[in-house]
Image (cartoon, helix red, strand yellow):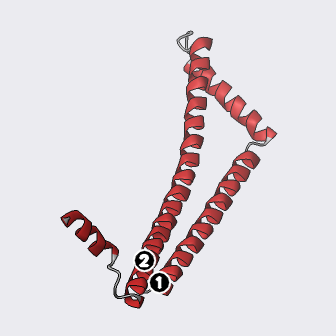
């Protein structure tokens, strides 16, 4: 493969990483914005009233006491926090995978450049052995 082709592939991979990173950041900001705008004071009050009504209906004779209610709220808040963390880790994983792909493409291009440089040097000076031949000569003696 020619060095120019590898350079184009690396540039294309870097462009893909940049676009995906920008898209991920944009989607995360949009999700964060929508989530925060969804929790208006009116909706918070309605959620509180609905929760209080449900707690009143589910508590026939004290079976669902205040301690259990607080425990349920703690569990739900933990669930919401873990969901937010998983969304953040998914975004980070997507960005990391894109960065690894770009790094692999850059490594391929670097190896191809080294190969092209060593092949060009061997063709210019036929007296010097290539790296593999030099290693073989040293290992045989």
* Precedes in sequence: disc 2 or disc 1: 1
From the viewer's perspective, tell me whether residue 67 is left or right of residue 103.
right
Check disc 1 and report the residue beneath it.
3
* Drawn side of residue 85 relative to residue 121, left or right: right
| Nearer to us in this view, 4 or 63 | 4
Residue 106 placement (x, y as % from top left)? 50, 70
- State the mark number for residue 103: none
* Picture disc at residue 112: 2
Element assignment for label 1 = helix
Check disc 2 and report its element: helix, strand or loop. helix
Q: Do the residues labelled 2 and 1 touch (CB within 8 Å)?
A: yes
Quadrant occupied by the C terminus: bottom left
Among the 4 quarters of the image, the one containing residue 15: bottom right
Is residue 3 among the parts visible in the rendering?
yes
Quarter of the image containing the N terminus?
A: bottom left
Name the outermost residue toward the front.
141
Rendered location of residue 111, percent (x, y): 43, 72
Would you say 54 lies left or right of 4 here?
right
The location of residue 108, given as percent across then percent down, is: 43, 72
Is residue 1 visible to the viewer in this orientation of the structure?
no
Extreme-right residue of the structure: 41
Residue in view at x 62 percent, y 18 percent = 70
């Amino acid at each position: 493969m020619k060095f120019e082709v590898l350079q184009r592939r690396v540039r294309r991979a870097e462009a893909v990483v940049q676009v995906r990173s920008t898209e991920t950041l944009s989607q995360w900001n949009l999700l964060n914005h929508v989530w925060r705008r969804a929790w208006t004071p009116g909706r918070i009050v309605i959620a509180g009233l609905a929760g209080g009504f449900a707690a009143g209906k589910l508590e026939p004779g004290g079976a669902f006491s205040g301690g259990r209610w607080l425990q349920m709220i703690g569990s739900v808040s933990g669930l919401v926090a873990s969901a937010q963390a998983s969304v953040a880790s998914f975004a980070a994983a997507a960005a990391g995978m894109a960065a690894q792909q770009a790094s692999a493409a850059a490594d391929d291009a670097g190896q191809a450049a080294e190969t092209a440089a060593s092949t060009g040097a061997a063709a210019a000076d036929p007296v010097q052995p290539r790296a593999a031949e030099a290693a073989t000569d040293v290992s045989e003696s």
